[in-house]
């Protein structure tokens, strides 16, 4: 299964919400899922990296909101076609998941 997680803070940045998302993503990746995380870039961190089986993409904080909207639209379209994509959004302690079946 392909899973996209959208979150503003992701380790090593952030607090409980980012850590919870990391733990969930790590577990999903360990089960053989393709996990992609789109998060904000902070100075000193790589823009692209692989972490514990998770493909991590960091973008400028000013651009994350617009990029997330574009990604959501694109991935929903792809999920309708491929019928095998899960989108997980975590923001401000609220998490929502969309699964195409």
Image: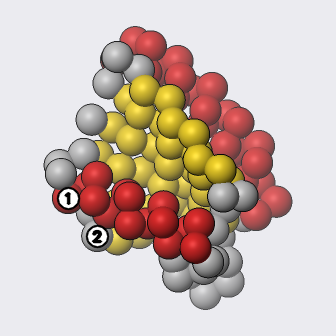
Which numbered tag is attached to residue 45? Answer: none
**Residue found 20% across the figure and 58% down from its top:** 30
Which label's residue is closer to the chain start, 2 or 1? 1
Give the crowd class for mark 1: few <14, some 14-19, many >=20 residues within 10 Å.
some
- Reading the image, the residue beneath label 1 is 30
* Residue 54 in picture, x, y percent from top left: 34, 60
Q: Where is residue 74 in the image (x, y as percent from the top left)?
A: 57, 27
Residue drawn at 41 percent across, 33 percent down = 86
Question: Could you give the CA–CA distance between mark 2 and mark 1, rounded to whole angstroms?
Answer: 8 Å
| Residue 7, quarter of picture | bottom right
Whether residue 50 is visible to the viewer of this picture, yes or no, is: no
Choose between 9 and 46: the one closer to the eye. 9
Q: Pick out the residue farthest to the top.
A: 81
Asked if marks 2 and 1 touch (Cβ < 8 Å), the reply is: yes
Mark 1: secondary structure:
helix
Q: Colour scheme in the image?
A: secondary structure
Q: Which residue is drawn at 38% across and 58% down?
A: 24
Horizontal placement of 71 versus 50: left or right?
right
In the rendered structure, the answer to whether residue 2 lies left or right of residue 48 reads left
Residue found farthest to the bottom: 44
Q: How crowded is mark 2: few (under 14 residues within 10 Å), some or many (20 or more)?
A: few
* Front disc: 2 or 1: 1
Residue at x-position 17% and y-position 49%: 32
Q: Quadrant of the N terminus?
A: top left
Q: In this view, does 18 lie above or below 33?
A: below
Residue of label 2: 52
Q: Which residue ends up furthest to the right in the rendered image?
A: 62
């Amino acid at each position: 299964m392909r899973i996209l997680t959208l979150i503003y803070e992701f380790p090593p940045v952030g607090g409980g919400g980012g850590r919870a998302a990391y733990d969930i993503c790590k577990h999903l990746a360990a089960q053989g899922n393709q996990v992609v995380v789109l998060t904000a870039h902070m100075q000193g961190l790589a823009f692209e990296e692989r972490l514990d089986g998770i493909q991590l993409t960091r973008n400028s904080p000013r651009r994350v909101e617009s990029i997330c909207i574009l990604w959501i639209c694109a991935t929903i379209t792809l999920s309708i076609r491929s019928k095998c994509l899960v989108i997980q959004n975590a923001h401000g302690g609220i998490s929502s998941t969309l699964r195409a079946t």
